[in-house]
Amino acid sequence: MPNAEVKVGDITVGTVTGVAFDDWTAELTVSLRRSVTLPANAEARVAQKSLLGAEYLELAPPEHDRPVGTMRAGDDIPVPRTGQYPETEELLAALSALLNQGGLSQLKTVTTELNDALAGREGDARGLVRNVEALASTLDRRKGDIVRAVENLDRLSATLAEQDRVIDDALRTIPPGLAALERQRSSLVQTLDSVSSFGEVASNVLNTSRNDLHANLTALQPVLQKLADSGKDLTESAGMLPTFPFATNNAFPAVINGDYGNLYITVDLDAKTLSDNFTRGLTVAGIPLLGGSSLSEGIPGANPLASGQPGLLPLPPEPPGEAPPEGGLLDRPLDALVPGGT
């Protein structure tokens, strides 16, 4: 009701200059003439000045209390000292209920009971309305997600409808499976108990050998690190093995480049040759030890033929041949060392 009249005793003394809302309560700002005098505890009521519904604000001294003080600019009239006269609609509704025995009396009963139920609980009712408003706002912001969820649910329903026979077969198969599990219940329980016992034993073993296992892994770490560092060399060496002794891998790219090589091997595996090859050189008779004695004399069993005990065999005699010249082989000319040399 902005710009509505303000009256005191049916005399217009000002106008309503502003309307605001604070916590579900309307706040009116009025402008009065300077000559208007009202007590500090004045009351305000909203009334109608015609059947058409035109409203005005009435200011008056309190009806049940003595006037106190003088109202000044900026003073407030609290909500308990405000009110409203019956409106035309309420009068007509009451008259209709009285004359026609209509349903307005029931509506009045509902309104009265609702007012009684909310009496003293206005704050809770306002909080409920605020929560409903917040819920409606949230739903409005998420309406796109809600629509997509409904569409996805529709597609899921269609997919399930297409798989109706499969679902029916699955539902028919589940009861026999559950019955089989029920029959094997004791075995399953026993198995789980065994697994639990095994877990306890394994845990005890691991806890007991944890330090040793940790030490072994720590000792193994350098070996594994060296293997990792030499991984490339190991793979390249493995590639050389099939080509031995004529290596043709990347390590020796041009050993036999454009040529060929022959290899002849004679393998002698008779017992005498093996004995001579593996035992020759084990005796070192004649090499003096510290103190002036020979090695054969200082090692027990080094001369099995003299002692009659098993030990190292002596060296075989040197094969007859031409003795090297004085100064060794290196003093001879190169053509004498290399056959066919010049």
Image (cartoon, grey):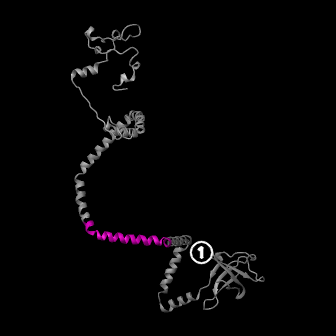
Please say whether residue 26 is one of the residues in the magenta stretch: no
| Residue displayed at 36% across by 71% down | 155
Task: Name the image quarter holding residue 7.
Answer: bottom right
Q: Position of residue 153 (x, y in %)?
A: 38, 70
Q: Is residue 325 left or right of residue 115?
A: left
Q: Position of residue 100 (x, y in %)?
A: 48, 92
Observer able to see residue 312: no
| Residue displayed at 25% across by 51% down | 185
Q: Secondary structure at mark 1?
A: loop
| Residue displayed at 50% across by 92% down | 99
333 to 106, vertically: above or below: above
Please say whether residue 165 is one of the residues in the magenta stretch: yes
Dominant secondary-structure state across the stretch colored magenta: helix
95 to 268, vertically: above or below: below
Q: Is residue 330 left or right of residue 317?
A: right
The N terminus, quarter of image? bottom right
Q: Which residues are magenta?
A: 139-168
Tell me the kind of residue under disc 1.
Trp
Q: Is residue 244 left or right of residue 90?
A: left
The C terminus, quarter of image? top left
Question: Dot 1 corresponds to which residue?
Answer: 24
Q: Position of residue 203 (x, y in %)?
A: 35, 39
Name the residue nearer the viewer: 69 or 251.
Answer: 251
Observer able to see residue 139: yes
Q: Position of residue 273 (x, y in %)?
A: 24, 22
Name the residue nearer the viewer: 208 or 50.
Answer: 208
Name the residue nearer the viewer: 255 or 280.
Answer: 255
